[in-house]
Amino acid sequence: MNYLSIIRSSILVGAAVLFMSLCAQPFELGFWNNINQNTNSITKAEVDWFCQDVVLNGVPCCPTGPNWHIRLWGACSPVDCDWGRLPAQTLASGYKFAYKDSGFARRYIYFKKSGYLTNALYVRIHTDFYDPARADYVSHDWFRM
């Protein structure tokens, strides 16, 4: 094998490794249960992600749309309330952000790998009620698979 062939092989292997590393499975991906089994907040979370692995002019383009989604279930009786699948985006802070309008309140949802608990997902939700007589609040929940 000549010197030029070795360089070509090295470039191809390096490009393949770089490509694979762009689509590594993120920590947040999966189905999560609140560590507080008696919570009156969010009981479960499901996080979906897909790799936008086609780059056009330096920008990930395909498939189109947000590559993060979160689905939450609130503590309701007799069964938990499904909030539906919500698109999310990655913020510069590292948090993923989603928004839900429940008709009576706006919910600002932030989630990421917990820096407090090992192998946990942290979800913070700011609830902003339309009714000014109702007090807004923030919930903090940790989840494990």
Image (cartoon, helix red, strand yellow):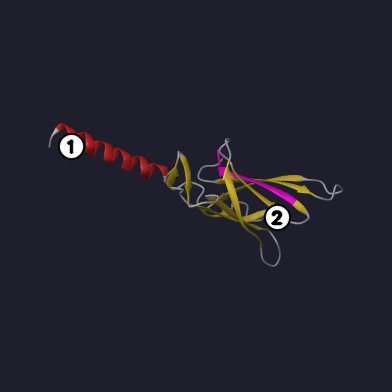
State yes or no: residue 64 in magenta.
no
x then y, percent, for residue 29:
50, 51
Q: Residue at x 48, y 52 (%)?
A: 63
Q: Quadrant of residue 22?
A: top left
Q: Is residue 60 left or right of residue 82?
A: left
Q: Residue at x 23, y 37 (%)?
A: 8
x then y, percent, for residue 48:
52, 54
Pick the front one: 102 or 65? 65
Q: Is residue 104 left or right of residue 44?
A: right
Secondary structure, magenta segment, majority class: strand
- Mark sitting earlier along the chain (2/1): 1
Instruction: Please name the residue that numbered disc 2 is placed on.
Output: 40
| Residue type highlighted by circle 2 | Asn
Q: Is residue 106 left or right of residue 70?
A: right
Q: Which residues are magenta?
A: 106-116
Q: Which numbered marker is on residue 5? A: 1
| Residue type highlighted by circle 1 | Ser
Dot 1: element: helix
